[in-house]
Every structure is written in C-alpha cells, then in structure tokens.
Amino acid sequence: MIYYLSKAIALFLLLVFFRFRVRGREHFPRSGPCLIVANHSSYLDPIVVGCACPRRVYFVAKEELFRNPVAAFFLRQLGAFPLRRGEKDVSAIKRVLSLLREGKVVCLFPEGTRNQGEVSDFKPGVVKLLIKAGVPVVVAGIRGTFESFPRGRSFPKPFPITVAFSPPLFLTSGEPEAVENEVKSKMKELIQIVS
C-alpha cells in the first residue's frame, strides 16, 4: 500500500513540476523476471524509474541510507534493500537473484554512485551479475534529473525529466567488457533520444 500510494503522489508531482515523459514503455516485459539498468546522476533516479515502469520495481540502494531506522522502514516498504559498497556483498546478490526467481523486476544503477551528468564506468560486479542472472535486461536512459537535482544541491528545481526504455536485451554470454560496452552504448543512445 505504501509503495503504490507513494508512486501515485510522486507521479503527480513529476507530471506537474517536471513535465515527466516516458518513452518505450511498450518494450517492458509484462510478466516474468527482469533487470533494469539505468544511469544514475541524482537521488531522483529511483523515484523516476519507479514511476516510469508499469510494474513494481525493487531497488538496490547503498547501505548508508538504511542507518536511520525511520528511513530504513520507509525504504524497505518501497522495495529497496541495502548493498555494502566497496566489497562483494553476497547477501545483496542473493536478494537480487531471489527476487528474479520470483518473477520480480529489480533495478540496478551499475555506476554504483551518482555521476556528474555523464555515464561513467560500471562496477565489475554488476556486469557479472547481468550475465549470471540470465533474465531480460531493459536499459533505461534518464534525462533531466541531473539538471534538476545534482550532487550538492539541497532541493530539486523544476526541469523536464524523461525516461526511455530499450527493448529487452539478453546478456547471457560474452566477456564482461563487451557486455558493459553494449549496455553503456545503449544507455547513452537512449539519453540522446530523450534530450
């Protein structure tokens, strides 16, 4: 209930203040497991992806966000779960794979942290997970969140925000470097489409 109520409120605010648009929603699998990989330049990105996706989304979030008990409760209600950065977090990986086995949608931000408006290198562990999971991967290109709410800004300012989804990719084989290049190339292409 908290998830869907929060999504409705967030979507209303995005439409009113950020002229929110979504492209490629028809590409999204209607059922079954799916991974979303998206560029990450703002705290707004998880909210934007959740509102753009036609299905409920579960998110991997940095462990530091869960240190406040109230924030941790709210984040878990929204489908987020913690990841310890800088190390191989086996419990987070198991959680992702468990959700996928249940046919859920999980969103990853493969850069591992907010960038400065340009797509940066992916974390090696994320690329390996994309291959290991063996599920459809939908790439999301987000445009406008950096301009609205970049690192260091205390409050978002109104700015048009758009999300574009790719058709599902099947990344079950290949060298990690080649997989990263394929996903990164698609991500940059989607960002340019919505610019």
Image: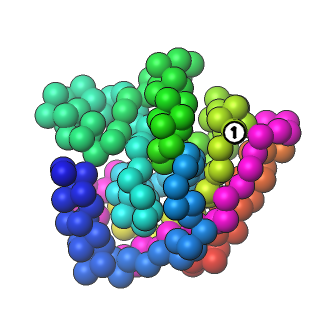
| Residue labelled with disc 1 | 134
Q: Where is residue 70 in the image (x, y as percent from the top left)?
A: 14, 34
Q: Position of residue 103 (x, y in %)?
A: 51, 43
Q: Find residue 184 and report its image quarter.
A: bottom right
Task: Compare residues 102 and 46 and report the one nearer the observer.
Answer: 102
Q: Say whether residue 170 is magenta.
A: yes
Picture residue at 83% right of the left edge, 44% below the top: 178
Task: Compare residues 88 and 93 and report the one nearer the observer.
Answer: 93
- Vertical arrangement, residue 68 with respect to residue 91, above or below: below
Q: Find residue 52 and report its image quarter.
A: bottom left
Magenta residues, as a range? Answer: 151-176
Q: Position of residue 116 (x, y in %)?
A: 52, 54
Picture residue at 69% right of the left edge, 39% below the top: 134
Q: In this view, does 107 lie to the left or right of 6?
A: right
Q: In this view, does 136 lie to the left or right of 163?
A: right
Task: Compare residues 72 and 155 and report the one nearer the observer.
Answer: 72
Give the color scheme: rainbow, by chain, secondary structure or one colour: rainbow
- Vertical arrangement, residue 104 with respect to residue 176, above or below: below
Picture residue at 23% right of the left edge, 72% below the top: 13
Q: Where is residue 77 in the image (x, y as percent from the top left)?
A: 24, 41
* Residue 127 shows up from this direction: no
User: Magenta span: helix, strand or loop, mainly?
Assistant: loop
Amino acid type at circle 1 is Gly
Q: In this view, does 135 lie to the left or right of 109?
A: right
* Residue 24 shows up from this direction: yes
Tag 1: Cα neighbours inside 10 Å, few (<14), some, or many (≥20)?
A: some
